[in-house]
Image: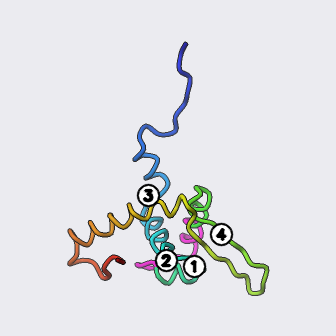
Amino acid sequence: MENTATFKYSWGIDAALDVIGGKWKPLVLYQLKEGTMRFSQIMERVKPKISQRMLTRELRELEKDGLITRKVYAVIPPKVEYTLTEKGDSLMPILDQLCDWGYEHMNEDIEFKCEE
């Protein structure tokens, strides 16, 4: 019997980088590790500054991939909050290690130290 399964990824690292890869997603996720945040709070904390359009796109992709949840409140002006899901929170040890590695090896070029 022939195996007809079709896989989207060859390796686990391929899948992980597809979900969190790029310049902005890890930074956005890392900000949310402290808890629920509004769009403007994320925008303010992500350095260097990300455009509103790019942040909106990244948040939508992170939500689609199940790493964050988006809660919309029916108030005027609109209020939207973002929170890590359990799946998103499971990335925090990995992102902490990446942050530590970057600080250890590139500390002369880094403005902020990783959160303890």
Q: Residue 37's mark?
A: 1
For the residues marked 1 and 2, what is the alpha-carbon distance in whole angstroms? 9 Å
Comparing labels 3 and 1, the label whose residue is closer to the camera: 1
Residue at x 70%, y 81% (from the top left corner): 79
Nearest to N terminus: mark 4 or mark 2: 2
On screen, residue 61 versus residue 23, left or right, reads right
On screen, residue 87 versus residue 21, left or right, reads right
| Amino acid beneath label 2 | Glu
| Amino acid beneath label 4 | Arg
Nearest to N terminus: mark 3 or mark 1: 3
Give residue 86's position: percent from left, percent from top.
55, 61
Comparing labels 3 and 4, the label whose residue is closer to the camera: 4
Quarter of the image containing the C terminus?
A: bottom left
Comparing labels 1 and 2, the label whose residue is closer to the camera: 2
For the residues marked 4 and 2, what is the alpha-carbon distance in whole angstroms? 16 Å
Q: Which residue is mark 3?
A: 21
Picture quadrant of residue 6: top right
Q: Which residue is mark 4?
A: 70
Residue at x 55%, y 71% (from the top left corner): 55
Task: Check disc 3: other Cα within 10 Å, few if <14, some if 14-19, many if 20+.
Answer: few
Picture quadrant of residue 69: bottom right
Comparing labels 4 and 2, the label whose residue is closer to the camera: 2
Give residue 58's position: percent from left, percent from top.
55, 65
